Image (cartoon, helix red, strand yellow):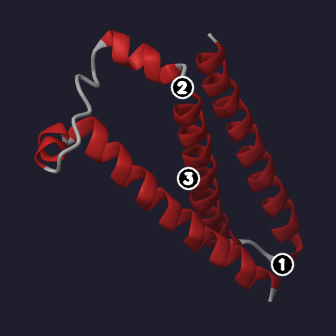
Amino acid sequence: MRESRWWILSLSAAALMVVLLTLHMGLMHLSGLMKVLGVDPGDVRSFAAVMERGRSLAQMVFYLLFLGAALYHGLYGLRSVLLEVTPPRGQGVLSGLVLAAGLLAFAYGAYVTVRTFTG
């Protein structure tokens, strides 16, 4: 039962990534389509716009959510594949290594995101 909860969390992370990537693609890469829909994001790729977004609390939360969802989803999938080829005695160590790698990657990504936000 416990493993199925982790799997459902992985599916939830994937769904969150779809929503966040849809927002990102719509605002950053499909500005022409957004204008047709009545939303004018302006010049999102100018230096001033990038710096302004970098200091936006909403953007920081967006990146942290995406970072966490992508790391969890990817590392859970990697762990699942590696568990298939790992003997039962080493599975706990493998899970610990994947967890440590994920925490380190999240800490670094969060540090960079927060540093950008705080200037």
Indicate whether 31 appears above or below 117.
below
Q: Are marks 3 and 2 in contact (CB under 8 Å)?
A: no
Q: Are marks 3 and 1 in contact (CB under 8 Å)?
A: no
Q: Secondary structure at mark 1?
A: helix
Q: Quadrant of residue 53?
A: top left
Amino acid of disc 1: Pro
Q: What is the spatial separation of the Cα atoms under label 3 and label 2, in whole angstroms?
A: 21 Å
Q: Position of residue 34 (x, y in %)?
A: 19, 45
Q: Nearer the viewer, residue 22 or 69?
A: 22
> Which residue is denoted by mark 2 in the rendering?
56
Amino acid of disc 2: Ser
Q: Quadrant of the C terminus?
A: top right
Q: Which mark is residue 88?
A: 1
Neighbor class of circle 3 (other Cα within 10 Å; few <14, some 14-19, many 20+) is: some
Q: What is the spatial separation of the Cα atoms under label 3 and label 1, in whole angstroms?
A: 27 Å
Q: Is residue 113 left or right of residue 47?
A: right
| Residue in the image at 67% along x and 65% along y | 79
Say which of marks 3 and 1 sits in front: 3
Mark 3 or mark 2: whose residue is earlier in sequence: 2
Say which of marks 2 and 1 sits in front: 2
Say which of marks 3 and 2 sits in front: 2
Q: Nearer the viewer, residue 36 or 48?
A: 36
Mark 3 or mark 1: whose residue is earlier in sequence: 3
Q: Secondary structure at mark 2?
A: loop
Q: Quadrant of residue 61?
A: top right
Q: Position of residue 100 (x, y in %)?
A: 80, 47
